Amino acid sequence: MTAGGFTPERIAALLLHALPDAVVVSDAGGVIRFWNAGAERIFGFTPGEATGRSLDIIIPDRQRARHWSAFARTMETGESRYGAGDLLSVPALRKDGSRISVQFSMIPMPGPDGGLEGVIAVLRDVTAEFEERKRLRAAR
């Protein structure tokens, strides 16, 4: 039972729009369908600039083949190693072309026909932590 304004719908809406992490939803073809304020803060693209474009806008060239191979496998099987709370750490691109390090988990989105309609990814910028670990390893 929920009290006052603590409804699942209100909580979900607040999370989607106010979460400081990026929430990026893409369809089965890898086209961005939702881009929250956290994604704008992390990657630099406004929702209007990102929505309708390929995920390639945030995937560095060197990682694209591996990304799209794993993406296609997830779309075919409905399963991902990163859907059960496991985090994947990868490089990503910002609008200005700079590289950052992100960690993300994803949630497959089943469609009405039982196949996957797309995926929801929750991404966090971990560049500062990654650089600190690299600095500490180099100091040993």
Image (cartoon, rainbow, N blue to C red):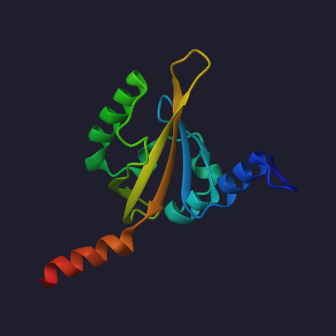
Judge left or right: residue 79 versus residue 52. Answer: left
> Which is more toward the observer, 72 or 80?
80
Q: Is residue 122 above or below residue 100?
A: above
Residue shown at 57%/65% (left/top)?
41
Q: Is residue 109 above or below residue 92?
A: above
Measuring from the top left, give residue 42's x and y in whole percent.
Answer: 51, 64
Residue shown at 54%/17% (left/top)?
114
> Which is more toward the observer, 139 or 49?
139
Identity of the residue furthest to the top in this view: 113
Identity of the residue furthest to the front in this view: 1
> Which is more toward the observer, 119 or 33?
119
Residue shown at 58%/39% (left/top)?
52
Measuring from the top left, give residue 105's x and y in whole percent.
Answer: 44, 48
Q: How many marks?
A: 0
Measuring from the top left, give residue 2's x and y in whole percent.
Answer: 81, 50
Identity of the residue furthest to the right in this view: 4
Q: Is residue 29 above or below residue 84?
A: above
Judge left or right: residue 137 versus residue 15. Answer: left
Task: Classify residue 111 by image quadrant.
Answer: top right
Identity of the residue furthest to the left in this view: 140
Measuring from the top left, give residue 96's x and y in whole percent.
Answer: 45, 65
Split into 4 quadrants, where in the image is the C terminus? bottom left
